[in-house]
Image (cartoon, rainbow, N blue to C red):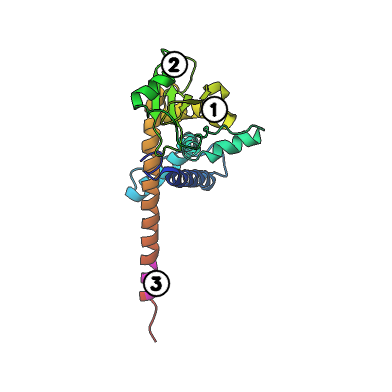
Amino acid sequence: MHSSLLLEDTGKGVLAFVALSYLFMLVTGVVLWWPTRWPPSLRITLNRGLLRGLFDLHRTGGAVLGLLIAVSVATGAYMAWRPLGNVISTTVGQQPVKPPVVPKGVPSGPRLSLDELVARAQQVFPGQPIGYVQVPAKPTRPMRVRFRLSDDPHPNGISSVWLHPLTGEVLAVRRWQDLDAGNGAVAVIYPLHTGVLGGVVNQVITALLGLALGGLGLSGIWLWWRRRATAARNNDNALSSRPTS
């Protein structure tokens, strides 16, 4: 749900668009907040009504926390839509690494079980813990077993063994150092996004930033609605106060 909205590649594209839109909203919010005089006033008034307090919290909180929240939003967009990584790799002159292609034709020999397929992958990295076993939805796509090697910065491991999903033939072996810049960056971007990079302190900060992000969205909608309702009420009052002929 979080990574693809249960819609596979389509959902990832939607999430990336939403994340980039939120990033745009954060930037425009800072532009609207940007003061003409420095140092800026970060005062939050809470004794002049709910609307004024909420406005100050939205405005000042967004300005103070905007950069940190932008890191979470940008890293989420990066992971959600892989073409962003391909753009980076192309920019630095590298060819994006793609999954291997499953050979066409009917495979010979018996179809291996999942345990046997995983055992084939473990022969490549013996004794190394497995982070993920990604089983393809179609037999025309390779199976991927991700390993958490000792030097892999990704908490779930991104060094991979690609297998034929039926015969267990090893199609490709790629350590995280062998990936292109765009795909290899996920090894650092993922733990930065989840807060794992930096330990418990960063995880707590990331959780609080997630709550702040939701709070900014809800308070922004509320302020927009109240302003809209106030404008409509003022317009009605102006019309009712006009003399009739």
Q: Find residue 196 and report its image quarter.
A: top left
Mark closest to the chain's N terminus, 2 or 1? 2
Indicate the quadrant containing the C terminus: top left, top right, bottom left or bottom right. bottom left
Residue appearing at x 36%, y 71% in the figure: 236
Give the amino acid type for the residue marked by disc 3 in the picture. Ala
Q: Residue at x 42, y 18 (%)?
A: 122
Viewer-closest of 14 and 236: 14
Kindly give the residue lying farthest to the bottom in the view shown: 245
Tell me how far mark 3 sits from mark 2, CA to CA: 80 Å
Query: Is residue 218 inside the magenta stretch?
Result: no
Which segment is the magenta one? 234-239
Task: Look at the image and tell me whether residue 112 can be seen.
Answer: yes
Q: Secondary structure at mark 3?
A: helix
Q: Which residue is mark 2?
A: 123
Give the residue at mark 3: 238
The residue sitting at the right extreme is: 93
* Cα–Cα span, label 3 and label 1: 61 Å
**Marks 1 and 2: in contact by CB < 8 Å?**
no
Question: Closer to the N terminus: mark 3 or mark 1?
Answer: 1
Image quarter hosting the N terminus: top left
Q: Amino acid at mark 2?
A: Gln
First-in-chain label (3 vs 2)? 2
Residue nearest the viewer, comparing 208 with 231: 208
Which of 222 and 204 lies nearest the eye of the viewer?
Answer: 204
Which residue of the protein is positioned furthest toward the front in this rendering? Answer: 108
The residue at the point 37 percent across, 57 percent down is 225
Mark 1: which amino acid?
Answer: Gly
- Which secondary structure is most common in the magenta stretch? helix
Q: CA distance from mark 2 to mark 1?
A: 24 Å
